[in-house]
Image (cartoon, helix red, strand yellow):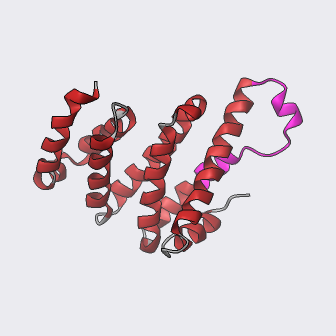
């Protein structure tokens, strides 16, 4: 069973440079496997009969929701790891091998990053900077990052225009080469 406490502990461990990659990979592999399992459940009538495990994706989504709400209300130390995990999840959802359950992974990464953006003033510049960089370096596959940027602009367009105008201009130079 995945609990908010377990996720918070893993995110805290991810703050230690030596364990950062392994901790985030653990969370990522658990989430991707849960999304894959959930996708199999929805596509197969007999899979539910032989699989007695609970739906781990719903458990992970619920636990992450609790962690995000607590992170923006006091668990500030895990926010950088939570943002890193959100971007790692967003990048993983773009992989062709994850096409069947891409929507679930994208939606979860959107929730993590948007809720952190919305709830934590300090996280806003970090999320925007990484998101704009991701859009620039993506090779024509920036649909999800652009969708997240659209959500963020709708929420707080003034911050973007005042502090990130040069980065947006740079991103706009790359958009014609994406199509």
Instruction: Residue 51: tell me if it is visible.
Output: yes
Locate residue 100 relative to residue 163 in the image: left or right: right
How far across and how far down the image is residue 167, in percent? 17, 49
Residue at position x 62%, y 68% from top?
5
Q: Is residue 49 magenta?
A: yes
How far across and how far down the image is residue 18, in percent? 52, 74
How far across and how far down the image is residue 99, in percent? 56, 30
Judge by depth and name the residue closer to the eye, 177 or 78: 177
Q: Is residue 40 magenta?
A: no
Locate residue 101 relative to residue 1 in the image: left or right: left
Instruction: Residue 74: tell me if it is visible.
Output: no
Residue at position x 53%, y 64% from top?
21
Residue at position x 52%, y 68% from top?
20
Residue at position x 59%, y 49% from top?
61
Using the rendered view, name the quadrant where residue 154 is placed: top left
Locate residue 3 relative to residue 133 in the image: left or right: right
Quarter containing the C terminus: top left
Specify the principal SS of the magenta part. Answer: helix
Q: How many marks?
A: 0
Residue interval drawn in magenta: 44-63
């Amino acid at each position: 069973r995945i609990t908010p406490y377990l996720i918070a502990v893993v995110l805290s461990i991810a703050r230690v440079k030596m364990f950062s990659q392994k901790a985030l990979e653990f969370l990522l592999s658990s989430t991707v496997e849960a999304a894959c399992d959930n996708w199999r459940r929805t596509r197969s009538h007999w899979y539910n009969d032989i699989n007695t495990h609970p739906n781990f994706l719903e458990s992970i989504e619920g636990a992450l929701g609790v962690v995000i709400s607590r992170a923006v209300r006091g668990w500030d130390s895990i926010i950088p790891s939570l943002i890193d995990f959100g971007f790692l999840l967003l990048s993983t959802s773009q992989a062709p091998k994850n096409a069947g359950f891409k929507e679930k992974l994208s939606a979860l990464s959107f929730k993590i990053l948007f809720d952190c953006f919305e709830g934590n003033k300090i996280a806003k510049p970090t999320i925007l900077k990484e998101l704009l960089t991701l859009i620039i370096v993506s090779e024509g596959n920036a649909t999800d990052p652009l969708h997240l940027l659209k959500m963020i602009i709708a929420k707080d367009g003034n911050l973007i225009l005042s502090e990130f105008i040069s980065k947006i201009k740079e991103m706009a130079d790359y958009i014609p080469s994406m199509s």
